[in-house]
Image: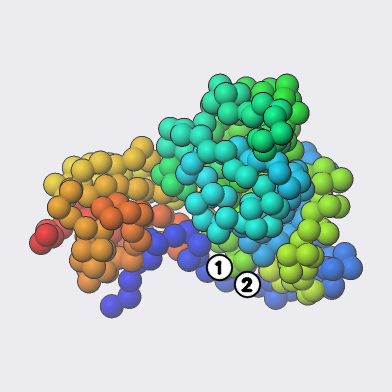
Amino acid sequence: MSKINLISDTVTKPSEQMLEYMFNAAVGDDVFGQDPSINALEAYAADMFGMDGAIFCPSGTMTNQIAINVHTRPLDEVICDVNSHIYQYEVGGYSFNSGVAINLIEGVNGIITAEQVRDSIKLDYDWLPASKLVVLENTCNKGGGSFYTLADIEPIRKVCDENDLKLHLDGARLFNALVETKESTEAVGSVFDTISICLSKGLGAPVGSLLIGSNKDIKRARKVRKALGGGMRQAGYLAAAGLFALKNNIPLLKKDNLRSREIGDILKGQDYVRKVKPVQTNIVIFDLKENILATTFLEQIYHKGILASAFGPNTVRLVTHQDISEHEFEKVKSILTSRFSF
């Protein structure tokens, strides 16, 4: 029996239309800046956000790590929420790649405030790292797909400006937020120094992320990317998929968000669920009753036809995406409301 994969939106595969677009891509050597498809993707993304330029990389981890390196030097520190991807899921790369410390804030479901940022800035003492960069994540994975609005970000930008801090956005699922807030990409671009966006999650491309920023920062980013082993040759086939995704797939994210909220509402009524995090986009995180292990629950839904992931001993994450058919979504709802033996 085939399984319905709700492990992540990273499991999406290119559509037939995207594959055709990829196969027709013009390619060259991107290390020399001669891949026309990569150049077109970078220019398109930069224009979307009203920024100078962009650089195409294999992963969002790489774009985040490049941004940290561009904005800091050894003995500096990065301020972020404790649930941030750069802290939780990038292998301590901020230290390994850039020699910087990290200053963690306890936000609400991954969302921090300007006041918290201001209170976290270190004094200029010899024995303290220098606060130089704030990183926000939109949407926040461990926060259950929570997101910032421009009204949340603008006061943080003001604090950064007043204290000579740079502001980077880990926007891996940014477009899932923007289809909810209806805010423009240009407005988002105006409040950040650099922005990372992922093309291989809900947008459905097979590989790739973009770092977007000023000409100066992107020039430095190309050097850092090369040092990290991220220089690519005829990667225009992958870039073409990303360009197709940005031009065609952003509106599809609204359906993913709606489906997740429907799943969240269903889970609130189930006797095996203790708590559901607020569902704002396409991620559903819920805690099981204390006597139910996540591994036990995942095994039972696996046999019923769903793949999902544990987010703690008693916590499960489900992620909706465009590769789930209407029939499969109905089956998901049926399985989650079926009888379990715990």
Quarter that holds the C terminus: bottom left
User: Callout 1, which amino acid?
Assistant: Ser
Residue 329 picture quarter: bottom left
Identify the disc placed on residue 15.
Answer: 1
- The residue to which callout 2 is attached is 19
Quick check: 191 above or below 61?
A: above
For label 1, the crowd category at 10 Å Cα-Cα, with few meaning under 14, some 14 to 19 and many 20 or more, is some
Residue 336 picture quarter: bottom left
Q: Residue 90: percent from the left, percent from the top?
A: 56, 57
Q: Residue 74: percent from the left, percent from the top?
A: 73, 47
Nearer-the-camera pick, 52 or 295? 295
Instruction: Give the CA distance from mark 1 to mark 2.
Output: 6 Å
Identify the disc placed on residue 178.
Answer: none
Q: Residue 139: percent from the left, percent from the top?
A: 52, 43
For label 2, the crowd category at 10 Å Cα-Cα, with few meaning under 14, some 14 to 19 and many 20 or more, is some
State left or right for residue 38 relative to residue 154: right
The answer to whether marks 1 and 2 mark residues whose Cβ atoms lie closer than 8 Å is: yes
Residue plotted at (67% across, 47% down): 100
Q: Secondary structure at mark 2?
A: helix
Residue situated furthest front in the rendering = 127
- Can residue 116 be seen? yes
Residue plotted at (28% across, 55% down): 313
- Can residue 330 be seen? no
Nearer-the-camera pick, 31 or 92? 92
User: Callout 2, which amino acid?
Assistant: Leu
Residue plotted at (58% across, 28% down): 120
Quick check: 120 above or below 19?
A: above
Q: Secondary structure at mark 1?
A: loop
Residue plotted at (42% across, 37% down): 109
Quick check: 76 above or below 65?
A: above
Colouring of the image: rainbow
